[in-house]
Amino acid sequence: MEKVKKKVIFSGIQPSGCLTLGNYIGALKNWIKLQDEYNCCFSVVDLHSLTVRQDPKELRRRCMDFLVQYIACGLDPEKNLLFFQSHVSTHAELAWILNCYTYMGELSRMTQFKDKSAKHEDNINSGLFTYPVLMASDILLYQTDLVPVGSDQKQHLEIARDIALRFNHIYGETFTVPEGYIPEVGARIMSLQEPTKKMSKSDDNENAFIALLDSPDVIRRKVKRAVTDSDNEIRFAEGKDGINNLLSIYSSLSGKNMQQTEEHFADKGYGQLKEEVAEVVVESLRPIQEKYKQMMNDKDYVQQIYTASAEKALSISSRTLKKVYKKVGFVPKN
Ligand code: TRP
């Protein structure tokens, strides 16, 4: 029987702030479900994070921390490529080429660019502007079929598709045109303090998010302080953003669906809800934190993983880059 080729998945998280429960439920937990069925590349996209000023020491520490947490959460290094974007030179190289096939007009329509340039008024650098082109390169280099991302990245994914189609149109089939892969469940965990906003790993208010490495006491305190509402009824309903968020967290970590979750809390009060949510978070993060600690004591093992992954990633992506160089008319090296 002919072996069916597995589809390719690429995704990445920027090493800014710290990984949160939102990243775990919204991204990592879904990635883990995909690792058997697809060929997956999960990168710590460090080149992207330079679009905002970084402290070098902090950045280095955070990049390591993110990669180790990817593994601690359950991404199997035998099944996935887990690497730092800056270790694979083809990303920056393809980005230059694709910059020449992307229009100022389309980049200036990106809402993330508008938001970020408003937030960092003193540093509106051209990297911030061309950020989506680097992201398109990440994706297109691996002939990616599916890109699991949150809904805030839809626009960036759309531009990656447009660039792929445009290039293919000029030069003939070169890139697979990727599709977004927006997971059905638990996609969006909201801020504990402003539950109409997504839980952000770089929120200035530490009470707004739960970091994957927060201690049990800190987790309990943050959940206790979570914003709710004044009607005391535990049900998932429009306008009850704080309660909805706590119910979603509980549902996605306990494995109960929303209806079972509502039934479970039917005759209980907000205090009880918060206690149970805190406990399920603490218990879900405990094994992750233990594995994280273990691996931080075995840096050689971690280094082996990201080095081997980067080597493979370079080999796969170089094939695409070579094809592109040939199509645009560069003199071949060999
Ligand atoms: N821009 C993405 C974010 O902020 C991160 C990212 C960079 C990414 N390159 C990617 C996501 C490629 C998916 C695929 O969330």
Image: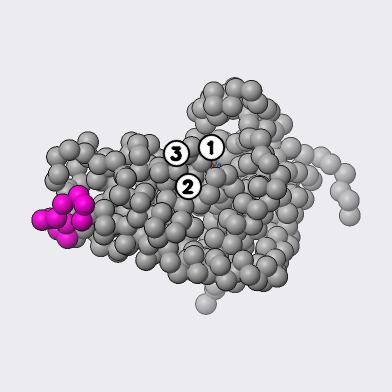
Q: Quadrant of residue 50?
A: top right
Q: Say if the magenta span includes residue 266.
A: yes
Residue corresponding to mark 3? 205
Please tell me which residue lies in front, 108 or 297. Answer: 297
Judged from this view, the residue extending furthest toward the bottom is 1
Render colour scheme? one colour
Residue corresponding to mark 2? 149
For the record, the magenta segment spans 263-272
For the point 63% across and 35% down, the residue is 52
Judged from this view, the residue extending furthest toward the left is 267
Tell me if label 2 and label 1 are in contact, CB under 8 Å.
yes
x then y, percent, for residue 73: 49, 64
Residue 99, labelled with which disc? none
Badge 3: how crowded within 10 Å, few (<14), some, or many (20+)? few
Asked which secondary structure carries label 1, the reply is helix
Under mark 2, the amino acid is Val
For the point 10% across and 56% down, the residue is 267
Asked which secondary structure carries label 2, the reply is loop
User: How far apart are the two marked residues, 2 and 1, measured between alpha carbons?
Assistant: 10 Å
The C terminus, quarter of image: bottom right
Tell me if label 3 and label 1 are in contact, CB under 8 Å.
no
Please tell me which residue lies in front, 110 or 228. Answer: 228
Under mark 1, the amino acid is His
Residue at mark 1: C-beta within 8 A of ligand 1: yes
Residue corresponding to mark 1? 156
Please tell me which residue lies in front, 53 or 258. Answer: 53
Asked if residue 2 lies left or right of residue 99, the reply is left
